[in-house]
Amino acid sequence: MAKNMQPIARRCKALGISPAVMGYDKKTTTRNPGNGMRKKQSEYALQLKEKQKLKFIYGVLEKQFAGYFAMAERREGMAGENLLTILESRLDNVVFRLGFASTRRDARQLVNHAHFTVNGRKVDIPSYQVKAGDVIAVRERSKSSPKFAQYAAADAPLVIVPAWLSRDAAELKGTVLRAPERSDIEFEVSEHLIVELYSK
């Protein structure tokens, strides 16, 4: 399976993303400030940058991203917002947003290793689309591992869960309350530019 192995800090700087969005503690990077600054970007460059930003944040490769956009266009509503909803609804992203993994990359690996269930059934597909009412839980045999035990401990790190999810730290599970909305996205993105890019 293809993996995105791009350096986090360097790529975040290029795309104008805070590493905190990716789950990393370092919120800014000051290495070579202003280095590589260019003149005003073309319309195409701005559109491409927004697409690359989403692909990088969610760890999605080109072919899969194009498939998501085609899916978003078929749904009712605005294609750009539909695209964000689809990406946010990926199981690996939900595991990350529930605070059961430090980064989306970490969440993807944990899902691949079958540490989670959805509605009681083992799911090892990171791109699995969750829906309202789904219960995502750490598998019983995985709960005792140090990796997950830390999240149920009394001194567990504070997790800010988005409004469309609920988290039961003691049981190491979470519930999808509703589909994610545009207002639930915690980073800046101009999704209309991606729609314009694919409309050419």
Image (tube, rainbow, N blue to C red):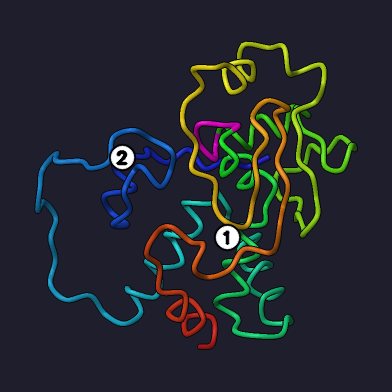
At x 31%, y 40%, the residue is 9
Q: Give above or below for 41 relative to 25.
A: below
Q: Position of residue 164 (x, y in %)?
A: 62, 57
At x 61%, y 17%, the residue is 147
- Is disc 1 in contact with disc 2, using a CB cutoff of under 8 Å? no
The N terminus appears in which quarter of the rendering? top right
127 with respect to 35 (left or right) = right
At x 23%, y 42%, the residue is 28
Magenta portion: prevailing SS class = loop
Location of residue 144 (image quadrant): top right
Badge 2 density bin: few <14, some 14–19, many ≥20, Cα 10 Å:
some
**For the residue marked with disc 1, what is the amino acid?**
Glu
Badge 1 density bin: few <14, some 14–19, many ≥20, Cα 10 Å:
few
Location of residue 141 (image quadrant): top right
**Magenta-span inclusion, residue 128:** no
**Disc 1 from disc 2: Cα separation:** 21 Å
Q: Earlier in the sequence, mark 1 or mark 2?
A: 2
Helix, strand, or loop for circle 2?
A: helix
62 with respect to 189 (left or right) = right
- Front-most of 133 and 43? 133
Q: Tell me the residue that label 2 is attached to.
A: 9
- Front-most of 68 and 151? 151
Q: Give above or below for 55 relative to 39.
A: above
Image: magenta residue range: 100-105
Q: Position of residue 136 (x, y in %)?
A: 76, 41
Q: Tell me the residue that label 1 is attached to.
A: 62
Q: Give above or below for 49 relative to 6.
A: below
